[in-house]
Each structure stands twice: as C-alpha cells, then as structure tokens.
Image (cartoon, rainbow, N blue to C red):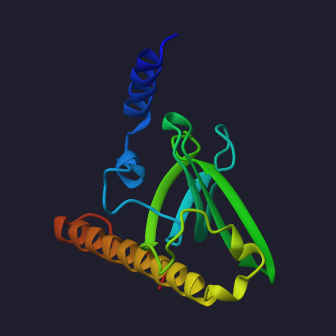
Amino acid sequence: MSTLVRIQQDQANVAHYNTDGRAALFDKANKNRIRAGAIVQITSLTSMTKGKPVTFAGVVISVRHKGIDTSVTLRNYVLKTGVEQTYKVYSPMITAIKVLKPNASFNRNKLYFLRENPQLVKWGVVDELVKTEAKKLLDASEAKAAKEAAASAKKGGKKGTGKK
C-alpha cells in the first residue's frame, strides 16, 4: 500500500471518530492545540458495557501524533505517588477532553524530566483547577434543576421535591 493511500485512510478514520471536535485539540496547524505542559482533564469509561465515567486530570508530559493512533500521556500525583496515564485520543472509551489550563512555561515537546524533578510543577494547582471545574458543573446542574422546577411549577404540574 502506498503512503498516499495510507494517509488518506488515516484521515478518513480520524474524520469518522472526530465526533466532538477532538482533532482540533491535537492538530499541529492549530495554534491553540494541546501541548506538553498543559493541564488537561480526561473523562473515560471503565468498560463499554457497564461504563462508569472515570476522570483523570494531570499535566500533559507528551503528545504522540500518529493520525488515528494519536495518544496523550498525563502525569499527576495521587496520594504522594506519581501516576501516569496514557490515553488514545480517538478511543470510543473517552467521553470528554477538557483543557483546564493551556501550556505552561515549558518549551519542550516531551516533559519526561518531570519524573525525576516533580518539584518543577505546582501539583496543587492541578487539584485546585479540578475542584473549581467540579464546582462549576455542580452549580450549572443545580441552576438547570431549579429552572426546570420553576417551569414545571409555572405549568401547574407537580412541585419539585429536590434535596437542599
């Protein structure tokens, strides 16, 4: 198979699995793409059948651009232990990719040196960003529930029995 045919097939596969605009996050032509040093939160499913969403946030230490096989590696400290997760960007198991903070002040494409020198990153910032993001989602869901309850009460339906 020629290289041109392989590239065309790869582009077709990326277009097929790019349902939520992920390709723009990792496109080399995009100036706002995800780079090493960015703080990213990825939500994935544990399995396709009984999929519980699992969220992992961390500093991007590497991005591997290989078309449909593009992957990103995140690093964070959980219970004083360094944890790395590698995700395939176009996997159907990934439900959301959210950039919490764009590229930090690193000028390299691979930040593997953070394994030996973790003090170069303020890991508390990652936790704070995740907490503020969770608070935003909670506030949005509460506002939506209150709006729906007010709309149903206005229509004369049942009054909402929401928890306070």
* Closer to us: 162 or 28: 28
| Residue at the spot 51% in from the left edge and 76% down from the top edge | 106
* Residue 35 point in image, percent of width and height: 47, 63
| Residue at the spot 17% in from the left edge and 64% down from the top edge | 155
| Residue at the spot 39% in from the left edge and 29% down from the top edge | 11
* Closer to us: 164 or 16: 16
Q: How many marks?
A: 0
**Relative to residue 142, is residue 50 depicted above or below?**
above
Left or right of residue 40, residue 24 in this image: left
Q: Residue furthest top?
A: 1
Q: Residue furthest left?
A: 154
* Closer to us: 136 or 17: 17
**Relative to residue 25, is residue 39 depicted above or below?**
below
* Residue 154 point in image, percent of width and height: 17, 71
* Residue 32 point in image, percent of width and height: 33, 63
**Relative to residue 47, is residue 61 depicted above or below?**
below
| Residue at the spot 40% in from the left edge and 48% down from the top edge | 22
Left or right of residue 114, residue 19 in this image: left
* Closer to us: 38 or 136: 38
* Residue 2 point in image, percent of width and height: 48, 13
Q: Using the rendered view, name the quadrant where residue 80 is placed.
A: bottom right
**Relative to residue 1, is residue 74 depicted above or below?**
below
